[in-house]
Image: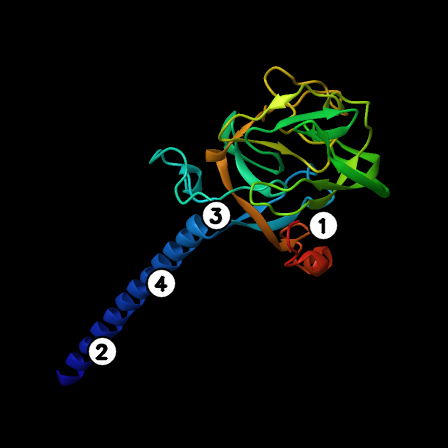
Amino acid sequence: MASNRDRAKAKAKTKAKGQESWIETIKTVFWAVLIALVVRTFAYEPFSIPSGSMLPGLLIGDYLFVSKFSYGYSRYSFPWSPKLFSGRILAGTPERGDVVVFRLPSDPKIDYIKRIVGLPGDTVQVKAGRLHISGKMVERRRTGQVVVYEQEEPTGRYAERLYQVYLESLPAGPSGQGVRQHTIYERSDTEFGSDNTPEYVVPAGHYFMMGDNRDNSCDSRFSATYNPTGPSGQRCGQIVGFVPFENFVGRAEFMFFSTDGSAELWEVWKWPFAIRYGRLLMGVR
């Protein structure tokens, strides 16, 4: 009898320990998810680069962290973009030259990444391939040329293209921060509609965004009233236009991973050869 009671007690203890183990596992998962959600909402959110519109600085297969606190918080800072409030709280000040992830104004479910070139009140125009801000031509210096095998926007087709490489110098922003330099690609200064645009006046609370791959980027140069055909022979499928400050998700900060795409997810043995080690932890300029 005593032996049966002992076995029953041991069985009950084992069952209780199993239940406690499940409870502890659930607690651990809950806190892990909560912490990840808080970090993702208020500190840093990961994003991947799906296209070549920001070449040469950002490559397809780059994975980067975006700081959520740099510009404060809007409804788009939160998962599922709940309509809790309008505008931004704890708003920071965007600068020319910042690389920003934002929600597309024409379809806020889609994330875009581009560079700020125009601030509220600026006039922005591209003439013969040269960017003009508030009537002044932005300086650039040719540094060479490169052949790029890239995916064209908006068709998604791949093609080999010859690009001229320039170092562009954006003027200082409202904080008085000095000239911001970055590298851009140009196929032509006169061949495409994006090389000669109307003069745009950036409205209050909005920003003018452009890709660094100037002849392969759907950006603020294209609007509901101006959407010429690009190098692919097609128009931009998604209209960008001026981007409201509210649509900003955050500022791109640094790469935490990068792959050249030569290894599928299941090809574990190829992973070490697909990683671009030189881009790990590289800052976004």
Q: Earlier in the sequence, mark 4 or mark 3?
A: 4
User: Which residue was labeled with disc 3?
Assistant: 68
**What is the CA distance from the residue labelled 3 to the residue labelled 2?**
52 Å
Residue 10 bears which disc, if any? 2
Q: Nearer the viewer, residue 226 or 26?
A: 226
On the image, numbered disc 4 is attached to which residue? 28
Disc 2 marks a residue whose amino acid type is Ala
Outermost residue to the front: 176
Marks 3 and 2, the one that precedes in the sequence: 2
Q: Secondary structure at mark 1?
A: loop
- Side (left or right) of 93 relative to 132: left
Above or below, 85 against 57 in this view is above
- Disc 4 or 2, which lies upstream in sequence? 2
Instruction: Specify the color scheme.
Output: rainbow
Is label 4 in contact with label 2 (beta carbons under 8 Å)?
Answer: no
What amino acid is at disc 1? Answer: Asp
Front: mark 4 or 2? 4
Three-letter residue code for mark 4: Thr
Question: Distance from label 3 to label 1 (Cα)?
Answer: 27 Å
Q: Nearer the viewer, mark 3 or mark 1?
A: 3
Image quarter in which the N terminus is found: bottom left
The residue under the point 65% across, 23% down is 236
Q: Residue shown at 71%/55% (left/top)?
A: 274
Find residue 74 and report its horizontal and vertical position in percent: 42, 39
Residue nearer the viewer, 83 or 18: 83
Spatial CA span between label 4 and label 2 = 27 Å
Q: Which residue is mark 1?
A: 260
Q: CA distance from mark 1 to mark 4?
A: 35 Å
Q: Residue furthest left?
A: 1
- In the drawing, does residue 77 fall left or right of residue 129? left
Residue 253 percent location from the top left of the image: 58, 51
Q: Which mark is residue 144?
A: none
